[in-house]
């Protein structure tokens, strides 16, 4: 088949990212040609500031070298500027006469710095700050001249000023507004910023309007202001904004208006022609930060790969100035207005200022100076539009989404040295991550996970990794979108998938994938188990459980170990056992030469080192129910001795534990579920760190929910106090069913609770009696449809095949 | 070409599923794709020797159960950004039976 011809004009980050995505999705669809006006291959433009500051070199910031294009069969024309698009003949023409025909065309022409229309703006030494050429000019000027003036006190201007100062120049920033970064900061924060920059030796002239650039022998010599004053200048850097490069598109008759106008699939008014990046006007907005550009690239590639399910709906952006030693962050509407409330923490002596803007109990803006650790978290709250009423009192103090184990108790990446360990699971140090980010041009936590393995196991260091990304990338880091798709196979979020399965009554994975137009033929190891769970939890006894879409532990009904053997945990109701069961367990251990037997944290017995082919035999000989220690399911109900023997016990906690375990076992869930019942407030069963913890008091039972003893210890929250054992079953069952129906796959109860809030759960489980009873009934209906998986497999039959080894 | 060994019928490997195959000391993993193709790899993930026969099959790769590396079924190579490979074995299907050459 003849490949389609794809031509790209422009060779910057947005464009090349689009090509990378196209190659990922449809590697053989296109014959690709790229025209770049610069003499370089694709480099990381956002790292120009560190290059100017002398912290990195051009080689450090190359993203795709010339070899990359060759490897992927892309024809690369460097130093060739396209001057004409003939839409009729579908040909682009370069200034030197080179032509290329196209079936699809991508315009990624970027933007140019806006040069103020001042007399003298064409003098030598007057430049913008946009490409390697500009950096070279600034470095050269710093070696021969003394006085630099930067016009514009925005992000780029301040970064340029900082770089030039570090290069030894005497730098003055001229800014027309009343304070610096007026689009990113409020006046107070800007004042703090100005002070610390002045401490670094920068000078500022605010509310100054330039009248003329004065030259001498063809080179800039001074700047004259409207008020008549003058300052010396050997170099003038204009950083007053960017202007989308849309002249080429305009000359071809494509509709432009402050940028090339595109729709939500990144197509221009000529549907064969796409546009991405800074040259674009999408819904009236031209973006100048890298994160939105990458989102555009993804959508554009998706459409080019003929999948057509991605849509770009605009981005909420945040900013972070990266001048070493200065931390600031802002997002949303940080200046506030009518109907908004401010929460402010101001410590000018300590150099910290934080302002959060709320409207209708939602965070709508944030402006942080000096301490930006929680910037990513605020940004997420803002994007999610989450109700923050219940966390309002401690909102200002942030939320540590950094776990508290495995990284020496550190929770601020900035305070860590390069050789300190960030990921305790995979032994990844801060320096490794920083290096990978710079070397491979990584922009997201997912990228870092893939390349370094940090945060890819238990995930407790995800927050630290985010911080490292933010501080390494500076202004162009943007946390992952809040409404995240399930995985790379689809654009649907977990919630959307659940809703579609419910509304359309989808009953199998192939059906669900077809209906929602999955991108990959069979999904991946991350979405298939999730889909399988959503199907069987939404349509119990109707949807078909697919063993091939379960993790091996749930397929083999035992826990895989590092050497490929399995461990077996028989069910012991409430942690109670007896001589006969213990004797049988001992016999099984002898018969199958079990190398290790240990008591688990949940009061059960674990037999290790069992060969897979022996599992059905072990289960038959044990003749005990499955302990589900391998599943996203009810694991154990831990109990204390209780009133039967204990002199402090107020309630029969062992019996309560047994009843709970018998009622809810065989319950599949989004993640593992652990319960505990203590017979008095001394809480020997550690009920405060369980998904559902029940504590007996003299007058009844207290039920706590959302505890977690893992990666980050979370204390369960009080839900309700009830009188009878029946009520304990009904309330905790209703809570668990709500979690089963609404949480995302792999959410523990605490993660789901943090998202929906305890008030929501109270409304559903406490206030709505009919709803509670219905929830409980649905849970009972679901678990009663499940059989004991061990018993099914202990006898011969189709289910046994999983455990049989073929030989030749 | 000689030495094709008959392993089992196609039906004995679940679609999008796996089977373990032993040949002397050698452990081999068999995989059946959605479109009923069968592939065989040495049952050792190049990362930490995880049993690929216990993984999840998607499209043309298998995800190792231990640390989620993706291994291509055709050539046994780890998919980017991971690097490494395990040995593939030729497999053919004739009148509903699976044959392997070792």
Image (spheres, rainbow, N blue to C red):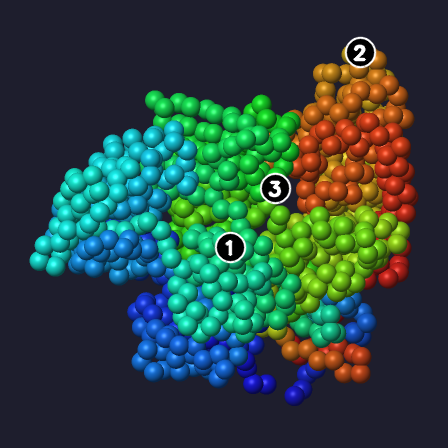
Q: Nearer the viewer, residue B73 or A120?
A: A120
Q: Is residue A562 left or right of residue A377?
A: right
Estimate how packed mark 3 is, as few (under 14), some (14 to 19) or many (20 or more) residues with alpha carbons within 10 Å. Answer: some
Residue at the image point whose x is 79% and y is 38% from the top: A738
Q: Is residue A642 left or right of residue A465?
A: right
Q: Which residue is mark 1?
A: A284
Say which chain tag 3 marks.
Answer: A
Task: Specify the label residue A647 is tagged with.
Answer: 2
Q: Is residue B92 left or right of residue A797?
A: left
**Judging from the image, what secondary structure is the residue with disc 1 in?**
loop
Q: Position of residue A802 (x, y in %)?
A: 78, 60
Q: Nearer the viewer, residue A404 or A31?
A: A31
**Badge 1 and badge 3 in a common chain:** yes
Q: Position of residue A32 (x, y in %)?
A: 47, 76
**Judging from the image, what secondary structure is the residue with disc 3 in?**
helix
Residue at the image point whose x is 69% and y is 63% from the top: A518
**Badge 2 and badge 1 in a common chain:** yes
First along the sequence among labels 2 and 1 = 1
Q: State the CA–CA distance, disc 2 to disc 1.
A: 73 Å
Q: State the CA–CA distance, disc 1 to disc 3.
A: 23 Å
Which residue is at the far front?
Answer: A227
First along the sequence among labels 3 and 2 = 3
Question: Does residue A613 appear anywhere in the picture?
Answer: no
Q: Which residue is mark 3?
A: A384
Which residue is at the far bottom?
Answer: B1
Mark nearest the camera among 2 and 1 is: 1
Dividing the picture into quadrants, the one containing residue A605 is top right
Q: Identify whether B77 is placed above or below A84.
A: above
Q: Quadrant of the C terminus of chain A?
A: bottom right
């Amino acid at each position: 088949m003849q490949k389609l011809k794809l031509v790209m004009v422009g060779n910057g980050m947005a464009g090349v990212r689009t090509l990378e995505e196209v190659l990922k999705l449809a590697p053989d669809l296109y014959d690709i040609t790229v025209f770049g006006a610069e003499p370089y291959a694709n480099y990381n433009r956002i790292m120009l500031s560190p290059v100017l500051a002398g912290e990195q070199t051009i080689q450090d910031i190359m993203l795709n070298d010339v070899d990359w294009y060759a490897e992927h069969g892309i024809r690369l024309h460097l130093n060739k500027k396209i001057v004409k698009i003939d839409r009729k003949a579908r040909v682009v023409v370069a200034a030197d006469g080179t032509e290329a025909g196209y079936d699809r065309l991508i315009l990624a022409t970027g933007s140019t710095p806006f040069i103020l229309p001042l007399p003298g703006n064409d003098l030598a030494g007057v430049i913008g700050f946009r490409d390697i050429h500009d950096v070279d000019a600034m470095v050269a000027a710093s070696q021969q001249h003394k006085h630099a003036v930067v016009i514009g006190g925005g992000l780029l201007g301040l970064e340029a000023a900082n770089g030039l100062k570090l290069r030894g120049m005497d730098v003055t920033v001229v800014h027309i507004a009343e304070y610096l970064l007026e689009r990113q900061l409020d006046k107070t924060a800007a004042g703090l910023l100005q002070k610390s920059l002045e401490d670094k030796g920068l000078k500022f002239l605010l509310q100054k309007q330039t009248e003329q650039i004065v030259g001498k022998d063809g080179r800039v010599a001074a700047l004259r202001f409207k008020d008549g004053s003058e300052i010396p200048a050997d170099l003038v850097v204009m950083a007053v904004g960017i202007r989308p490069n849309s002249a080429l598109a305009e000359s071809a008759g494509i509709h432009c208006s402050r940028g090339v106008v595109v729709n939500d699939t990144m197509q221009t008014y000529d549907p064969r022609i796409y546009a991405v990046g800074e040259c674009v006007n999408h819904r009236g907005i031209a973006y100048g930060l890298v994160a939105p550009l990458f989102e555009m690239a993804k959508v554009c590639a998706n459409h080019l790969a003929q999948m057509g399910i991605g849509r770009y709906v605009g981005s909420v952006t945040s900013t972070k100035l990266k001048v070493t030693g200065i931390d600031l962050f802002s997002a949303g509407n940080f200046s506030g207005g009518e109907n908004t409330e401010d929460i402010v923490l101001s410590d000018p002596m300590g150099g910290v200022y934080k302002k959060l803007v709320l409207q209708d109990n939602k965070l709508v803006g944030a402006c942080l100076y000096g301490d930006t650790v929680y910037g990513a978290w605020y940004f997420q709250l803002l994007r999610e539009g989450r109700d923050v009423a219940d966390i309002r009192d401690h909102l200002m103090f942030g939320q540590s989404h950094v776990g508290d184990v495995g990284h020496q108790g550190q929770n601020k990446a900035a305070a860590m040295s390069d050789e300190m360990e960030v990921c305790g699971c995979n032994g990844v140090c801060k320096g490794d991550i920083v290096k990978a980010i710079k070397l491979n041009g990584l922009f997201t936590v997912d990228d870092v996970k893939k390349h370094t393995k940090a945060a890819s196991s238990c995930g407790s260091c995800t927050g630290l990794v985010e911080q490292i990304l933010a501080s390494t990338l500076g202004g162009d880091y943007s946390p992952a979108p809040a409404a995240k798709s399930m995985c790379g196979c689809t654009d649907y979020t977990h919630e959307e998938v659940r809703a579609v399965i419910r509304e359309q009554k989808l009953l199998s994975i192939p059906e669900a994938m077809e209906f929602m137009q999955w991108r990959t033929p069979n999904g991946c190891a991350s979405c298939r188990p999730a889909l399988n769970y959503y199907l069987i939890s939404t349509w119990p006894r109707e949807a078909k459980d697919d063993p091939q879409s379960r993790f091996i532990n749930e397929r083999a009904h035992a826990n895989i170990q590092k050497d490929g053997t399995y461990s077996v945990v028989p069910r012991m109701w409430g942690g109670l056992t007896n001589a006969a069961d213990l004797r049988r367990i001992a016999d099984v251990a002898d018969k199958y030469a079990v190398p290790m037997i240990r008591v688990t944290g949940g009061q059960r017995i674990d037999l290790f080192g069992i060969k897979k082919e022996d599992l059905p035999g072990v289960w038959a000989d044990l003749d005990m129910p499955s302990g589900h220690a391998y599943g996203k399911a009810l694991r154990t109900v831990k109990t204390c001795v209780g009133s039967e023997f204990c002199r402090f016990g107020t309630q029969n906690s062992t019996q309560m534990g047994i009843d709970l375990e018998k009622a809810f076992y065989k319950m599949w869930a989004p993640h593992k579920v652990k319960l505990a019942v203590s017979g008095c407030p001394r809480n020997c069963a550690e009920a405060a760190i369980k998904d559902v913890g029940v504590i007996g008091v003299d007058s009844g039972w207290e039920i706590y929910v959302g505890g977690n003893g893992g990666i980050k210890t979370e204390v369960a929250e009080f839900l309700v106090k009830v009188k009878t054992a029946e009520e304990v079953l009904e309330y905790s069952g209703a809570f668990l069913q709500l979690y089963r129906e609404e949480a995302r796959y792999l959410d523990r109860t605490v993660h789901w609770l943090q998202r929906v809030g305890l008030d929501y759960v109270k409304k559903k489980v406490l206030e709505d009696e009919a709803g509670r009873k219905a929830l409980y009934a649905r849970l009972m209906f679901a678990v009663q449809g499940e059989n004991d998986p061990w018993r099914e497999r202990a006898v011969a039959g189709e289910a046994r095949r999983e455990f049989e080894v073929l030989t030749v | 070409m000689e030495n094709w060994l008959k392993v089992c019928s196609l039906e004995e490997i679940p679609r999008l599923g796996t089977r373990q195959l032993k040949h002397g000391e050698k452990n081999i993993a068999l995989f059946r794709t959605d479109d009923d193709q069968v592939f065989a790899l040495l049952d050792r993930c190049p990362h930490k020797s995880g049993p690929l026969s216990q993984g999840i099959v998607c499209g043309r790769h298998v995800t190792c159960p231990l640390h989620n590396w993706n291994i291509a079924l055709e050539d046994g190579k780890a998919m980017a950004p991971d690097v490494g490979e395990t040995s593939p074995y030729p497999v053919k299907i004739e009148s509903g039976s699976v044959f392997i050459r070792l």
